[in-house]
Image (tube, helix red, strand yellow):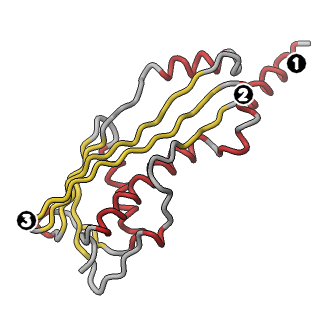
């Protein structure tokens, strides 16, 4: 009897419903839509500010630049043709973790949700010209037993979170490309 109860509890824990939904406030870009072909790479230096994970934002930005194939990332602003200063605006709700835990303890009977906000405010300086960018997108993760039905169609919540981050930075690079900042 004890074994079957533990097996049932483990099965419920593994199958509790969790699904993620992208808001798609920004267009979904693939690498070909923001790729740049240069004779010589543009030298880019960037700094990022965030309440948490400032280096993570720099990593996302650098990955988007590498995906565009246009740039060389340099260590100092003096070496750079383009200086990018970015701020990641934290719009998270710390109370969402409490409700997610409550939903987990009830095996998804009590619903909970959390919205990931990716909001970037960026200034790109080339010579004397400054270009300002403000980009935002989001994804909502829902924990609720009926989400078992939606889960196969929405993707893994962790993958959706990463995709929203990466796509926001790809959109930033695409806008910089359209403004002529990434081509020689």
The CA span between labels 3 and 1 is: 71 Å
Quarter of the figure that contains the N terminus: top right
Residue receiving disc 2: 16
How many residues crowd mark 1 within 10 Å: few (<14), some (14–19), many (20+)? Answer: few
Question: Residue 77 vs residue 56: left or right?
Answer: left
As measured in the structure, the alpha-carbon distance from the residue carrying label 2 to the one carrying label 3 is 55 Å
Instruction: Tell me where residue 156 sits by quadrant.
Output: top right
Quadrant of the image occupied by residue 107:
top right
Element type where label 3 sits in the image: loop
In the rendered image, the residue lying farthest to the left is 128
Judging by the rendered image, the residue that carries numbered circle 1 is: 3
Proximity of marks 2 and 3: CB atoms separated by less than 8 Å:
no
Residue occupying the far top of the picture = 1
Q: Secondary structure at mark 2?
A: loop
Looking at the image, the residue that sits furthest to the bottom is: 39
Q: Is residue 78 left or right of residue 14?
A: left
Q: CA distance from mark 2 to mark 1?
A: 20 Å
Residue 70, position in %: x, y? Answer: 33, 75
Q: Earlier in the sequence, mark 3 or mark 1?
A: 1
Q: Secondary structure at mark 1?
A: helix
**Nearer the observer, disc 3 or disc 1?**
3
The image quadrant of residue 17 is top right
Above or below residue 126? Residue 167 is above
Q: Residue at x 37, y 64 (%)?
A: 174
**Image x and y of residue 50, in percent:** 28, 40
Mark 2 Cα shell of 10 Å, populated few (<14), some (14-19), many (≥20): many
Q: Are marks 2 and 1 in contact (CB under 8 Å)?
A: no
Q: Mark number for residue 128? A: 3
């Amino acid at each position: 009897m004890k074994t079957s109860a533990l097996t049932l509890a483990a099965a419920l824990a593994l199958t509790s419903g969790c699904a993620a939904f992208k808001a798609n406030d920004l267009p979904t870009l693939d690498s070909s839509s923001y790729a740049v072909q240069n004779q010589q790479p543009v030298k880019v230096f960037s700094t990022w500010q965030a309440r948490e994970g400032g280096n993570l934002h720099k990593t996302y930005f650098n990955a988007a630049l590498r995906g565009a194939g246009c740039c060389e990332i340099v260590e100092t602003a003096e070496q750079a043709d383009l200086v990018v200063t970015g701020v990641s605006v934290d719009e998270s709700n710390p109370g969402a973790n409490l409700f997610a835990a409550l939903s987990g303890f009830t095996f998804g009977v009590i619903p909970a949700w959390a919205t990931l906000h990716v909001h970037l405010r960026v200034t790109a300086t080339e010579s004397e010209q400054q270009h300002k960018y403000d980009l935002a997108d989001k994804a909502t993760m829902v924990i609720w037993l009926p989400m078992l039905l939606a889960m196969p169609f929405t993707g893994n919540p962790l993958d959706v979170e990463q995709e929203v981050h990466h796509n926001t930075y790809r959109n930033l690079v695409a806008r910089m490309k359209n403004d002529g900042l990434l081509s020689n």
